């Protein structure tokens, strides 16, 4: 036995297949070219990495293509696994339903806030859950329902968000009863020169209706108010001279 024979024995060749299983001439090459064109599967490249794939016949090639998600035959549509039916999504809530849900959440949050805020030192709770804190004490009498009050006020939410569109800016003179119910109730307790911080529960503010996108339903309102003056409705404005009535003109003739 020569050296070449020993080398060949060390790596025995696979036994030839029976004659009826032998691929026809050109069958392997045609199948290989067919596989390269389907779904990017390059069998020749795979062989260079993992060694020869034997036997390479049409059945084996079809198996590889199917395993890779391809089609066993060129031009045959790829079979797809039926997609399981998805659970139908919940129908979106209508605007009214969302508003109602938000009102319930806000009411619970408002009640919780007022309960905790009422326990703070210096905070007083009165008429229908109205709360106030005296930032600056005033002197003198308090306004009544038939008085005009000169006030300056700013509005905010409990999270500190300002509501400048509701602010007075400069002091304004208005009838006490023209103020929001809860706001009017607080002003009637103030004395001239006082400055208070007032918390209006939802029932004394904008209630469940809210104020559009500005104030949500069942929201606590925070008002900082200063009272500068009080005078009866119909009385002359302080500092202005009294008007002298003009006598009627004499009739001609």
Image (cartoon, rainbow, N blue to C red):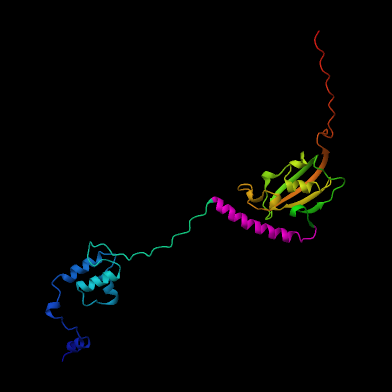
Q: Quarter-wise, where is residue 71 in the image?
A: bottom left
Residue 93 on image: x %, y %: 52, 54
Residue 114 on image: x %, y %: 72, 58
Residue at screen point 20% across, 69% down: 31
Position of the C terminus, as image quadrant, is top right
> Where 115 falls versus 182 (above or below)?
below
Q: Quarter-wise, where is residue 177 in the image?
A: top right
Apparent side of residue 141 relative to residue 161 in the rendered image (left or right): right
Q: Can you name the residue that lies furthest to the right here?
A: 140
Apparent side of residue 192 relative to residue 20 in the rendered image (left or right): right
Apparent side of residue 189 relative to residue 66 in the rendered image (left or right): right
**Magenta span:** 95-122
> Where 95 falls versus 12 (above or below)?
above
Q: Can you name the residue that lies furthest to the top here?
A: 253
Residue 208 on image: x %, y %: 64, 51
Residue at screen point 13% across, 81% down: 18
Residue 1 on image: x %, y %: 15, 92
Residue at screen point 76% across, 46% down: 184
**Front-lying residue, 199 or 100:** 100
Q: Does residue 108 show up magenta in the picture?
A: yes
Residue at screen point 27% across, 77% down: 51
**Total count of labels:** 0
Q: Can you name the residue that lies furthest to the front here?
A: 128
Dominant SS type (magenta): helix
Q: Does residue 34 show up magenta in the picture?
A: no
> Where 55 falls versus 39 (above or below)?
below
**Front-lying residue, 28 or 224:** 224
**Front-lying residue, 33 or 160:** 160
Q: Can you name the residue that lies furthest to the left here?
A: 19
């Amino acid at each position: 036995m020569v050296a070449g024979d020993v080398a060949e024995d060390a790596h025995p060749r696979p036994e030839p297949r029976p004659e009826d299983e032998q691929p026809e001439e050109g069958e392997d090459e045609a199948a290989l070219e067919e596989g390269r064109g389907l779904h990017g599967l390059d069998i020749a490249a795979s062989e260079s990495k993992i060694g020869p794939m034997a036997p390479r016949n049409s059945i084996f090639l079809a198996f590889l293509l199917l395993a890779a998600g391809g089609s066993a035959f060129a031009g045959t549509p790829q079979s797809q696994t039926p997609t399981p039916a998805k659970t139908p999504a919940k129908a979106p809530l209508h605007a009214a339903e969302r508003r109602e849900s938000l009102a319930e959440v806000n009411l619970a949050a408002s009640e919780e806030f007022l309960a905790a805020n009422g326990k703070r030192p210096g905070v007083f709770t009165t008429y229908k859950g109205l709360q106030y804190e005296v930032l600056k004490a005033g002197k003198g009498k308090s306004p009544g329902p038939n008085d005009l009050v000169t006030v300056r006020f700013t509005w905010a939410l409990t999270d500190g968000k300002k509501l400048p569109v509701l602010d007075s800016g400069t002091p304004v003179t208005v009838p006490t009863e023209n103020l929001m119910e809860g706001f009017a109730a607080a002003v009637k307790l103030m004395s001239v020169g006082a400055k208070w911080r007032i918390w209006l529960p939802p029932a004394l503010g904008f209630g469940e209706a809210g104020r559009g996108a500005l104030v949500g339903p069942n929201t606590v309102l925070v008002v900082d108010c200063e009272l500068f003056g009080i005078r009866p409705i119909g009385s002359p404005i302080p500092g202005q001279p009294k008007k002298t009535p003009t006598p009627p003109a004499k009739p001609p003739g």
